[in-house]
Amino acid sequence: MSEPQPTSPEQEERDRRIAELEARMARRRVGVKPVSAVLAIAVALVLLGMQWRDLAYFFSPREPLTLGAEGAYRVGALDSNRYAQVHGVPTVRGAYERGGDGALYVLVGLRESPFMVRRAALPGEEWRTGRPPPQPDQRPFAVRGRLLVEDEAPRYREALTLLRSMGEVQPHDGKLWLIVEGERPGADRGRVLVALALLAFIALNAVLLVKGLRRG
């Protein structure tokens, strides 16, 4: 039986380099660089922060905050990002918009109040682009939905500014308040699933960050 041949220096150097390369590849498979993990966590936290107000509304009380009716509004009970209900007489003029689903919506004020309402258009409120908008239905109505102070409703800033300039609503402490009809706490489960996914992503990168620091 023949004895094994001695390994040459070139073979030893080649084996050493192969072993180093395999070790590096193994480290890359089980983790990420600390800088990459920190960046990933930071981005996920920013995305989570952008959803914080919506998440707070998801878990807010489901019993509506009663804001009263014409002549007896409870402005002292105003609380932004809450589910609320109110009754009132609509303003003569309103603003119209198309939702992402193509449905027509009306932004109309409640007379002698700081309240604006965004609701679905009613029969007789049909509007087509390029034509003058019709007058909103003038029957008093009750509405339930998400209550937001105007500073927290940037999407509707232009419409609120327009309706404020018409002088039919009365801001409270310089602010208008918007009720988005139909938005109920606990309804948007998809947003919670996204938040949970972000939290899981943050936890995973935190673990990888710790492992990367220990290896370093």
Image: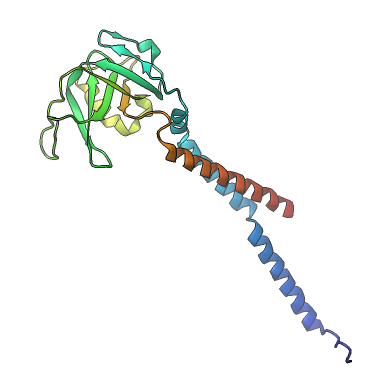
Viewport quadrant of the C terminus: bottom right
Above/below status of 74 relative to 9: above
Say left or right for 21 vs 131: right
Q: Where is residue 135? Give x, y as percent.
A: 13, 26
Viewport quadrant of the N terminus: bottom right
Q: Where is residue 18? Give x, y as percent.
A: 72, 74
Tell me, yes or no, if residue 216 can be seen here: no
Say left or right for 27 vs 46: right
Q: Quadrant of residue 89?
A: top left
Relative to the observer, which residue lies in front, 59 or 177?
59
Q: Where is residue 188? Give x, y as percent.
A: 41, 36
Above/below status of 174 relative to 97: above
Q: Residue furthest left?
A: 131
Q: Where is residue 191? Give x, y as percent.
A: 44, 39
Say left or right for 195 vs 165: right
Q: Residue at x 24, y 15 (%)?
A: 88
Tell me, yes or no, if residue 18 can be seen here: yes
Relative to the observer, which residue lies in front, 158 or 18?
18
Q: Residue at x 89, y 89 (%)?
A: 3
Q: Residue at x 38, y 19 (%)?
A: 64
Above/below status of 177 relative to 8: above
Above/below status of 105 relative to 213: above
